[in-house]
Image (cartoon, helix red, strand yellow):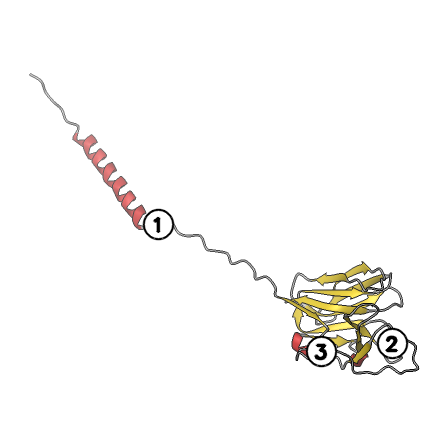
Amino acid sequence: MNIRIYDRTKRQRIGITITALLTFVLLAAACPAPVAPQVTPPEEPTKYEYTLEKFPNGKAITGNTGIAQNSPRPPYKGLQSLEGNEFSEWGFLVGPNSNPSCAVIWIGYLESNLNYLTVEDRQSCPPNILEISFTDSVKQVTLDFTGASVGYVLAAFDDNDNQISESNVRAEFEEEGNLFPISVESDDTNIKRVTFIPNENQIIAVNKITYWR
């Protein structure tokens, strides 16, 4: 006589294990894994670039100051006097800050047909210091300039007049007025003004102003 013995406890355990596994699979399908939060990259600053051939209203800058006939031939074809706030619609003022009317624009400097921002050479004006201030703080500033064969310094300051950064570039004088870029930059958007100064008593002639905000 053969006797069969069934291990009911083992079969019950197997059944419970299979049921638990199926339950886990069903729950996993119903509840997908959480999605990691997306990190938004910082926005790139906006670039603003201006040459001095026109005013913000579109009027061409052709000069408003005559040259006396008995004067020696100047290195420019015309002269545009400024009050300092003509370019405020573009986000910047020109000067020096102590006397904004010292800033002028040379029309067709040397053999070039370009216009150049400079500082007038007269007793009431600080010698060879061009200042550009911004209506809202910026992150980076680049000036394209021509000049004598000397070094030039561009310095950036914040709203409390603390110097943030400084850059030095040496220009090489050429009759064609080749342009040299010089830049300053800050980790934050906190540049409120810049000063542009030659290392020696030489000309300042800025053709293009570019800033990032």
Residue 175 got which mark?
A: none
Q: In the image, residue 70 lies at what x, y percent?
A: 93, 82
Q: Is mark 2 on a helix, strand or loop?
A: loop
Which residue lies at the image location 17% right of the left edge and 28% below the top edge? 7
The residue sitting at the left extreme is: 1
Looking at the image, do the residues carrying marks 1 and 2 touch, with CB atoms under 8 Å apart?
no
Q: Earlier in the sequence, mark 3 or mark 2?
A: 3
Query: Position of 121 compared to 60: left or right?
Result: right
Is 126 in front, or is 107?
107
Q: In the image, residue 198 lies at what x, y percent?
A: 84, 66
Q: Mark 1 points at which residue?
A: 32
Identify residue type, mark 1.
Answer: Pro
Looking at the image, do the residues carrying marks 1 and 3 touch, with CB atoms under 8 Å apart?
no
Q: What element carries label 3?
A: loop
- Find the distance from the CA under tag 3 to the CA under tag 2: 24 Å
Query: Position of 79 compared to 13: left or right?
Result: right
Q: Which of marks 1 and 2 is nearer the N terminus?
A: 1
Identify residue type, mark 3.
Answer: Ala
Which residue lies at the image location 66% right of the left edge and 75% below the top edge? 90
Q: In the image, residue 3 lies at what x, y percent?
A: 10, 20
Q: In the image, residue 174 lies at what x, y percent?
A: 85, 62
Q: Name the residue under label 2.
A: 121
Q: Nearer the viewer, mark 1 or mark 3?
A: 3
Q: Which of marks 1 and 3 is nearer the N terminus?
A: 1
- Find the distance from the CA under tag 1 to the CA under tag 3: 64 Å
Is 54 in front, or is 198?
54
Which residue lies at the image location 29% right of the left edge and 43% below the top edge? 25
Is 76 in front, or is 80?
76
- Find the distance from the CA under tag 1 to the CA under tag 2: 74 Å
Identify residue type, mark 2.
Answer: Asp
Q: Name the residue under label 3.
A: 60
